[in-house]
C-alpha cells in the first residue's frame, strides 16, 4: 500500500489560512485592504473581545456584483488579476484571491454587499469553508463583512491568541498604518462599543500622521524629493528629536501605498537619525516611496508584509542621505544644537528638573534590605566600598580611586539601578514615595498607549503614579515616584507596550526607572559618595536593570601597559 495521500480541500484550506490569517490583526489587515481596493473612503472596523469573537468591517466601496458573490470564498478568486503579466504592474493590495477563502475556512462569515447599480444587496453566509446560505436583503451600497468565532475549527491556532490588550495593540498598529496610507479616508475603530480611533479625512499626510499618533505638528518635518532617473519618488514625515521614543513603534515605511516591513530601509533611516538622537532612542517617522511597479516584487510574502525592491541598497543610501539633509538643514530647522560628536550625542535634558539626588528622608527605602551581607565584600564591590572620589568626566562618569585601580562609575546606569531597586522595595512595602503635583502634568498619548494605560493603570499605583485620563488623547499625571526625574518619559516607557511584555511590578519598575536620567549633570564629591553608598545598598550594584555595567575597573596594570611601562 502506498503512503501518499492527497489532502482534502478542507485540510488544504486550513493550511493555507495558516499563512494568511494568524490573528485578528491579520484579518483586519486583509479586510481593510479589500475595502481600499474597492475604492472606499469610509470604513468602520468593529471588534468584540479584541476581534476574537467578532470583527465587522463596513465600507462604502464599489460593492460586489451578485453574479460574483458565490465565487469570492473560492481559492484564487480575484477581480484584480487576470493574466500573469499583470503581476508586474499590480497596484491593488490584493491579487491572490486568498484572503476571503482563508478567512471563511477558519471562521463564520456573513458578507453583505450592494453595488450602486443594484437596488438589493446580497448576503452570503459561510462557515468553516462551506457556503450555507445566500439571500437578498436591503443594505447601503458598499460591503459589510462580519466574522465570528475566529479559529473555531483550528483550536491550536486559537490557543496562540494573546491577551486582549496585546491583540488590540496589534490591530491598532495595522489600522494606523493603513489610515496613514489613505489620509483622505474616514476611518473608525470601535472596540466593545468604545471608539479607539475616529479619524476625520485629513488634507495631507502630515496632518493624518499627527492625528493618528497624537503628535504635535510643529515637531514633524514634511519633505519630499523626486522623481529621480529611475522615476522613484520619496516623501517623508520626520519627527524631530523631541519625539524620540524607547521603541520603534512609530516607524512606518510604504512602498506604493502599501505598508511594508523592510529591515534594511528601517536600519538606514534609523542610522541617518543618529546624527540628532542618541543610539538608544528611536525616532518617529513615516516614509512613502513611489516606485515604478516593475522595480518592485510584492509577491514574496504570503501576507505581502515584505517586498523586494530592485537595487535596494542604493535606494536605502539615497534615502538616508536625504533624511540626513532634511534633519540637519531642512526647511524646518531643529531647535536643539547639534552635538559636537556625531557618534555620541548628548542626551536630551529631562523636561522636569528635580533635585539630583534622592533626599535623605528616603533613606529607609533605599537602605540595604535586612539580612543583606554586611561583611566587607571582595572584588569590585569591595573596591567600590573603599573608593575615594577623584572627579567626574563629561558629566557622565564619576572617577574614583580604589587601591591601585581606577573605578569609573556610569552615573546614569548607577542611578537606574538605585531607582529600580528602591521602586521595587517601596512597591513591596506598599509605601510608594511619590511626588504630588498641585497642577497635573499632561502627557499626550496615542490610541495604543491609551489601551496600554487602561490595561496597566492598576499596577501603576504601587509604583507611586497617580494618573487619570485628562481628555480623549492625554493623561494627567497627578503624582509620580519621587525617585523619577522625568515622569513623562518614565510613563511613556511603561506605556510603550511590546508584544508579550510582562506587566509585573519588576518589569514596570525596570521601565519606569528609565526616567531617572542622570547623565548631563556635574556631580560633586558629596553627591558621588552618596550615590556609591546607595549603590552598595543594592542587591545587584554592578549592573543597571537593563544589563549594562554600572562600574568599570581600570587596573594600574592596564594603565601602565598603555604607557608602555
Ligand atoms: P484579493 O483581494 O486578493 O482579490 P480576497 O479574497 O481578499 O482576494 O477577495 C476576493 C474578491 O472579493 C476581491 O478580488 C474582490 O473582487 C471581492 N471583494 C472582497 N472584499 C471586497 C470589498 N470590501 N468590496 C468589494 N469587493 C470585495
Ligand atoms: Mg484581498
Image (cartoon, rainbow, N blue to C red):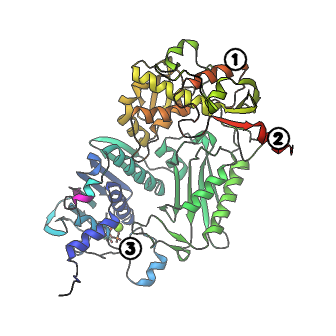
Indicate if the residue with disc 2 has its beta carbon within 8 Å of ligand 2: no
Task: Kindly identify which residue carries mark 1.
Answer: 526
Q: Earlier in the sequence, mark 3 or mark 2?
A: 3
Residue 101 visible, this angle: no
Q: Quick one: label 1 or label 2, which is nearer the N terminus?
A: 1
Residue span colored magenta: 147-156
What number is the disc on residue 560?
2
Where is residue 27, by image quadrant? Answer: bottom left
Q: Decide: few, some or many residues near mark 1? Use Cα within 10 Å; few <14, some 14-19, many ≥20.
A: few
Separation of marks 3 and 2 at Cα, in angstroms = 69 Å
Q: Quadrant of ligand 1?
A: bottom left
- In the image, 50 versus 184, the foreground residue is 50
Is the CB–ligand 1 distance for label 3 below 8 Å? yes
Q: Name the residue beneath numbered marker 3.
A: 95
Q: CA distance from mark 1 to mark 2?
A: 30 Å
Q: Nearer the viewer, mark 3 or mark 1?
A: 1
Front-most of residues 10 and 194: 10
| Residue for point 73% across, 21% down | 524
Amino acid at each position: 500500500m502506498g503512503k501518499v495521500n492527497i489532502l482534502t480541500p478542507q485540510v488544504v484550506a486550513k493550511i493555507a489560512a495558516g499563512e494568511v490569517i494568524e490573528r485578528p490583526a491579520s484579518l483586519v489587515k486583509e479586510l481593510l485592504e479589500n475595502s481600499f481596493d474597492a475604492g472606499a473612503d469610509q470604513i468602520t472596523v468593529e471588534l468584540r473581545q479584541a476581534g476574537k469573537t467578532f470583527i465587522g468591517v463596513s465600507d462604502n466601496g464599489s460593492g460586489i456584483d451578485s453574479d460574483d458573490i458565490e465565487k469570492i470564498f473560492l481559492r484564487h478568486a480575484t477581480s484584480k488579476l487576470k493574466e500573469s503579466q499583470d503581476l508586474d504592474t499590480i497596484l491593488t493590495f490584493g491579487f491572490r484571491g486568498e484572503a476571503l477563502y482563508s478567512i471563511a475556512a477558519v471562521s463564520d462569515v456573513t458578507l453583505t454587499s450592494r453595488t450602486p447599480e443594484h437596488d438589493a444587496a446580497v448576503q452570503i453566509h459561510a462557515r468553516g469553508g462551506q457556503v450555507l446560505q445566500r439571500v437578498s436583503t436591503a443594505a447601503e451600497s458598499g460591503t459589510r463583512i462580519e466574522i465570528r468565532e475566529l479559529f473555531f475549527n483550528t483550536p491550536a491556532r486559537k490557543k496562540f491568541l494573546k491577551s486582549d490588550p496585546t491583540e488590540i495593540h496589534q490591530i491598532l498598529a495595522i489600522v494606523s498604518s493603513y489610515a496613514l496610507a489613505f489620509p483622505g479616508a474616514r476611518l473608525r475603530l470601535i472596540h466593545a462599543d468604545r471608539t479607539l480611533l475616529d479619524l476625520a479625512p485629513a488634507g495631507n499626510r502630515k496632518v493624518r500622521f499627527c492625528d493618528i499618533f497624537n503628535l504635535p505638528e510643529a515637531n514633524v518635518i514634511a519633505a519630499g524629493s523626486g522623481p529621480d532617473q529611475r522615476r522613484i519618488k520619496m516623501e517623508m514625515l520626520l519627527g524631530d528629536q523631541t519625539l524620540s521614543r524607547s521603541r520603534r513603534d512609530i516607524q512606518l515605511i510604504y512602498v506604493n501605498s502599501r505598508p511594508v516591513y523592510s529591515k534594511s530601509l528601517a536600519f538606514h533611516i534609523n542610522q541617518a537619525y543618529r546624527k540628532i538622537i542618541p543610539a538608544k532612542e528611536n525616532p518617529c517617522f513615516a516614509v512613502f516611496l513611489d516606485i515604478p511597479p516593475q522595480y518592485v516584487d510584492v509577491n514574496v510574502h504570503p501576507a505581502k508584509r515584505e517586498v523586494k525592491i530592485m537595487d535596494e541598497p542604493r535606494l536605502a543610501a539615497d534615502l538616508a542621505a536625504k533624511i540626513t539633509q532634511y534633519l540637519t538643514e531642512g526647511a524646518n530647522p531643529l531647535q536643539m544644537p547639534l552635538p559636537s560628536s556625531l557618534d555620541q550625542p548628548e542626551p536630551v535634558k529631562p523636561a522636569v528638573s528635580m533635585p539630583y539626588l534622592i533626599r535623605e528622608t528616603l533613606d529607609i527605602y533605599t537602605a540595604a534590605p535586612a539580612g543583606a551581607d554586611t561583611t566587607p565584600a571582595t572584588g569590585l564591590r569591595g573596591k567600590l566600598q573603599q573608593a575615594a572620589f577623584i572627579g567626574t568626566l563629561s558629566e557622565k562618569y564619576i572617577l574614583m580611586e580604589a587601591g591601585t585601580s581606577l573605578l569609573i562609575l556610569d552615573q546614569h546606569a548607577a542611578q537606574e539601578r538605585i531607582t529600580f531597586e528602591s521602586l521595587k522595595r517601596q512597591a513591596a512595602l506598599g509605601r510608594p514615595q511619590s511626588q504630588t503635583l498641585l497642577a497635573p502634568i499632561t502627557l499626550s498619548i496615542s490610541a495604543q498607549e491609551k489601551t496600554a494605560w487602561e490595561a496597566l493603570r492598576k499596577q501603576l499605583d504601587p509604583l507611586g503614579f497617580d494618573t487619570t485620563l485628562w481628555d480623549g488623547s492625554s493623561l494627567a499625571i497627578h503624582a509620580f515616584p519621587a525617585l523619577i526625574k522625568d515622569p513623562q518619559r518614565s510613563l511613556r516607557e511603561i506605556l510603550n507596550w511590546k508584544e508579550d511584555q510582562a506587566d509585573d511590578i519588576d518589569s514596570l519598575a525596570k521601565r519606569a526607572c528609565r526616567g531617572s536620567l542622570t547623565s548631563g549633570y556635574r556631580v560633586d564629591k558629596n553627591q558621588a559618595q552618596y550615590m556609591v553608598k546607595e549603590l552598595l545598598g543594592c542587591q545587584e550594584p554592578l549592573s543597571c536593570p537593563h544589563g549594562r555595567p554600572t562600574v568599570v575597573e581600570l587596573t594600574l596594570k592596564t594603565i601602565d601597559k598603555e604607557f608602555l611601562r
